[in-house]
Amino acid sequence: MRACRRPGRWGVLILWVLLLVVPAAQAFEDDENCLMCHKYPKMGRITDDGVFRSYYVMPHVFARTVHRNVPCTDCHNYIKQLPHRPVKTGVQCNSECHSIKNPATGKQFSHKPIYDKYMDSVHGRPKVATGPDRDKPYCVTCHTNPIYNPDEKALPKHIVDRCVVCHEDRDFVENWYKHTSRRIKEVRRSNKEIVQLCANCHGDERLVQRHLKAARLEGRELGRKYPYAVESYLESFHGKVTRYGFQKSPSCLDCHADAENYYLNVHFIRPSRDPASPVSRERKLETCRRCHKYADENYAQLDPHPTSDPADNRFRHYAEVIYGWVGDIVLFLLVGMAFLETVGRWRDGVVWKIRKGSSWWRKSKRDRDRVI
Ligand code: HEC
Ligand code: HEC
Ligand code: HEC
Ligand code: HEC
Ligand code: HEC
Ligand code: HEC
Ligand code: HEC
């Protein structure tokens, strides 16, 4: 309708007012009218580095995400007026939702319990970090805004109908059904995905070197295996079977995070020098025993991060060097003997001939004719 008639000056004003008061038709409440502007696909800006940064929010996608009931300003709580002020910190994941209560505790909902664990972990950093801390993962490094049950087109009617018989309101039921069914379904990343996630940083040679240097300058300790974490895991038996898609062998988190209360403790990775870490000297055996039921102290000494760097494992290094030499010498002797034998036969008068048979005799060069 809007397209048919060019609105006059007042018309434009009314249109703006209408847009401000009438929320667009979508599955979530945009009662702050942010989408009035942010629903336009081209919306964005070119940053100082010359990169286009999109400010477009897709209403139909956002409406299917786990955060769809959170009003925009509960997260973007720094936006208080229009036009917006320049952003300093952006969204922090420990803020309290003003609009959503946790029905179990009656308090305003917040990810603060996870956030506090994370801040105490090896990866804890403020949203805007400086120096080496910038390399650490923030919540949004590992999490996007996931969609509820992405592979499910329609909700199973036979279940939803049953809820509706009591709750009467279909929207209520569908919302809660999505909420719980996502959590009942296993959404844990596969072992391969977790290895990939950690390898993004721990397998990045330059990042690792940067931190070794920073730690040296600050006189700070880093784990013995810090420089080899990923390559050595991939080299290990666990890493190899994981690469073939085996789910029962441990990913990084099966060892480095407590299995109990997994979803909280993946955020509480501590270095192995902390006795609280499941890979500390004190708790390592207990961790191996989760899968290797009959493991003893000796078994737990087997290295889950095997390397042959002399600085890390001198025995393995020299064993590899010696085996390397033994292999080379044996090969050299074999080829050398075959060569000498060939030369000797040639001097004895054995000549190769491809056509009409393989070899024939001629006069020996050193008077050793073997006439048969
Ligand atoms: C009148 C139109 C309009 C409305 C309404 C509006 N915005 Fe914006 N928003 C903009 C424009 C224009 C920009 C780009 C500003 C810039 O680049 O300086 C922007 C940028 C942003 C940014 C990115 C800021 C940055 O620099 O990183 C966020 C986040 C944002 N808006 C959130 C919101 C939220 C949340 C609401 C609802 C409370 C909202 N906007 C409502 C026009 C609007
Ligand atoms: C669950 C929290 C959450 C909700 C709800 C949310 N956002 Fe965001 N939004 C984020 C995060 C996190 C980012 C990434 C930028 C950052 O870390 O500050 C972001 C980025 C953006 C950006 C790009 C800004 C930039 O600097 O790249 C815009 C624009 C935006 N959001 C608008 C909205 C609008 C409009 C809504 C409501 C429909 C909304 N957001 C709802 C958390 C949220
Ligand atoms: C036989 C009737 C009945 C059926 C079927 C039923 N519910 Fe309920 N539901 C109730 C009653 C009654 C309560 C309040 C119970 C209480 O507070 O102990 C409730 C509470 C709830 C609540 C908590 C609401 C709140 O804000 O505290 C949710 C969520 C819920 N039901 C979702 C569902 C879903 C989803 C289904 C279908 C899978 C379902 N229910 C099937 C009767 C039913
Ligand atoms: C190093 C990566 C990483 C960082 C950083 C991280 N998380 Fe997680 N988070 C995970 C993993 C892994 C899981 C387990 C589920 C999975 O495998 O996806 C998880 C699970 C969760 C869950 C449960 C999800 C569900 O569907 O049950 C929430 C909520 C969560 N994280 C919030 C946060 C918050 C808030 C922060 C920042 C304080 C954060 N995470 C930082 C990796 C991370
Ligand atoms: C975004 C990059 C990034 C990701 C992703 C990441 N890490 Fe880290 N990790 C770091 C940085 C940076 C440090 C800190 C090094 C320092 O203290 O200087 C660190 C430290 C650690 C440490 C302690 C090292 C020590 O000796 O103090 C462990 C253990 C660790 N990470 C394990 C993991 C695991 C397991 C995963 C996968 C779930 C993971 N990390 C994902 C960047 C990352
Ligand atoms: C089978 C258990 C196990 C698995 C799987 C495992 N680790 Fe480790 N990790 C350990 C142990 C034990 C140590 C301590 C070794 C030592 O210092 O002797 C360690 C040490 C580390 C360190 C050095 C920092 C510290 O805490 O000492 C990093 C970083 C690390 N692992 C990252 C990873 C990453 C990334 C993965 C996955 C690619 C992974 N680990 C898989 C058991 C494991
Ligand atoms: C999440 C379960 C899990 C954890 C935790 C775990 N492993 Fe394993 N490990 C496996 C699986 C699965 C295999 C391969 C299949 C098999 O041998 O049964 C394996 C194989 C091995 C092998 C290869 C030889 C063998 O005995 O089969 C060694 C050595 C090993 N693990 C050592 C360790 C050590 C040391 C720890 C503790 C630091 C540990 N594992 C922790 C699951 C685990």
Image (cartoon, helix red, strand yellow):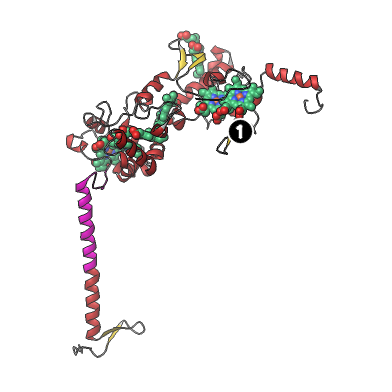
Q: Which residues are magenta?
A: 306-333
* 327 inside magenta stretch: yes
Q: Is residue 155 above or below residue 302?
A: above
Asked if the residue at label 1 sits under 8 Å from ligand 1, the reply is yes
Please state the horizontal and vertical placement of residue 297, each as a whole percent of the image: 17, 34
Quarter-of-image position of residue 183: top left
Please state the horizontal and vertical placement of residue 38, each as a whole percent of the image: 63, 27
* Image quarter of the N terminus: top right
Quarter-of-image position of residue 2: top right
Please state the horizontal and vertical placement of residue 369, each as a whole percent of the image: 20, 89
Q: Secondary structure at mark 1?
A: strand
Quadrant location of ligand 1?
Answer: top right
Please state the horizontal and vertical placement of residue 294, each as a whole percent of the image: 20, 34
Q: Is residue 336 above or below residue 50?
A: below
Q: Residue furthest front?
A: 217
The front one of 348 and 371 is 348
Q: Which residue is mark 1?
A: 45
Locate residue 129 relative to residue 58 in the image: left or right: left
Give the overall secondary structure of the magenta segment.
helix
The front one of 110 and 137 is 137
